[in-house]
Image: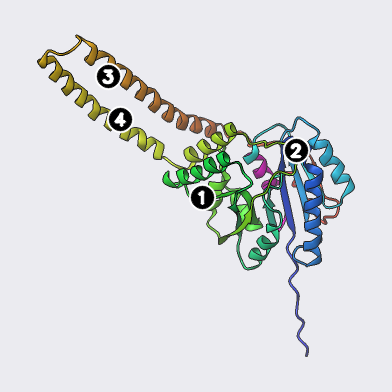
Amino acid sequence: MTAVVQMKSPPRLAIIVPCYNEEETLQATCEKLRTLLAALRAERAVAAQSYICFVDDGSRDKTWEIIARLTAEHDDIAGLKLARNVGHQAAVLAGLHECDGDALITIDADLQDDEGAIREMMQRMGQGYDVVLGVRADRSSDAWSKRFFAESYYRLLKAMGVKTVFNHADYRLLSQRAADALRQFPEANLFLRGMITLIGFKWTTVSYARRERLAGESKYPFRRMLSLAWEGITSFSVVPLRIVSVIGLLVSLASLAVTAWAIYVRLTGDYVPGWASTVVPMYFLGGVQILCLGVIGEYIGKIYMETKQRPRYLVDEHIAAHKLTAPAVRTS
């Protein structure tokens, strides 16, 4: 009797692209990703039902109009429109939560992260990895200042005890099992680069060179980068609170030293009456107290936001990819 060998079917891939005011890049991004997807289908690296889902994060330009047109023109394009702008991290999470697939890959719409690395990500998944992280091995296309602050930030996170992968942003592959595990993280203060490392499944990295934007300007200015940096530190580390405790101890020691100095100058007679004992401690202690209250207040604010349990995003509209045998976007 001849044994029947069953060929394992290729995985269904969903490429999730968060978009915010990306009307200048969407057409070119769509063409590049569809070309790659067609090549992967031809190689039987992904299933025929694989697709691309553009997530509109409350854009104020024609981003959603372009997404709707692309879904009408191509069978393998899906669209997800969020009710309002919720930020890049929540938009990425919305795509991961609402899309179905054996493999889910998130990549920014500007394609500064080389889409060609998707092929290697799929190969790594075939080797048994549930999480594959894209790591920027070459950032020469970034301005010196951006590269310096970004790399300094990763080092700061490490010093604060936050477990992240150096030079990894939000370009990654998750298996369906890993995506389901991520859905169990309920926090409102999102920092996906830290959350992904907490999943604990088998993971690896893929390196690539970062490129120039296809068109338009960056939607992540320095102010938002600082906000994300602070979010990552305060969401995954209590080191700032410990620093406050150390500052309190140092201030106490400094106050004792100032007191000893004030007594010394009083006894020697070379002093301005009242100055040493009033002005110096007042300004010093006042500044330290305000700093410490600010750090503590940041953590209290996070607790406040978490207790509200508000939804992290709301879906306004979705358009499924026509080629799929099952809906591309969850309706729940």
> Which residue is at a point 28% across and 18% down the rendered structure image?
280
> Which residue is at a point 63% across and 57% down the rendered structure image?
177
| Amino acid type at image mark 2 | Glu
| Amino acid type at image mark 1 | Thr
- Inter-mark Cα distance, 1 to 2: 28 Å
Label annotation for residue 285: none
Sequence order check, earlier mark of 4 and 3: 4
- Inter-mark Cα distance, 3 to 2: 53 Å
Which residue is identified by label 4?
A: 248
Sequence order check, earlier mark of 1 and 4: 1
| Amino acid type at image mark 4 | Gly
Magenta stretch, overall SS: helix
Which residue is identified by label 3?
A: 281
> Which residue is at a point 22% across and 15% down the rendered structure image?
276
Residue 210 placed where, x, y %?
A: 64, 50
Which residue is identified by label 2?
A: 22
The answer to whether the residue labelled 3 contacts the one labelled 2, judged by CB atoms less than 8 Å apart, is no
Residue 241 placed where, x, y %?
A: 38, 35
Sequence order check, earlier mark of 2 and 4: 2
Residue 43 placed where, x, y %?
A: 78, 67
Side of 286 relative to 268 (left or right): right
Residue 234 placed where, x, y %?
A: 47, 37
Mark 2: which secondary structure?
A: loop
Mark 4: which secondary structure?
A: helix
Which residue is identified by label 1?
A: 164
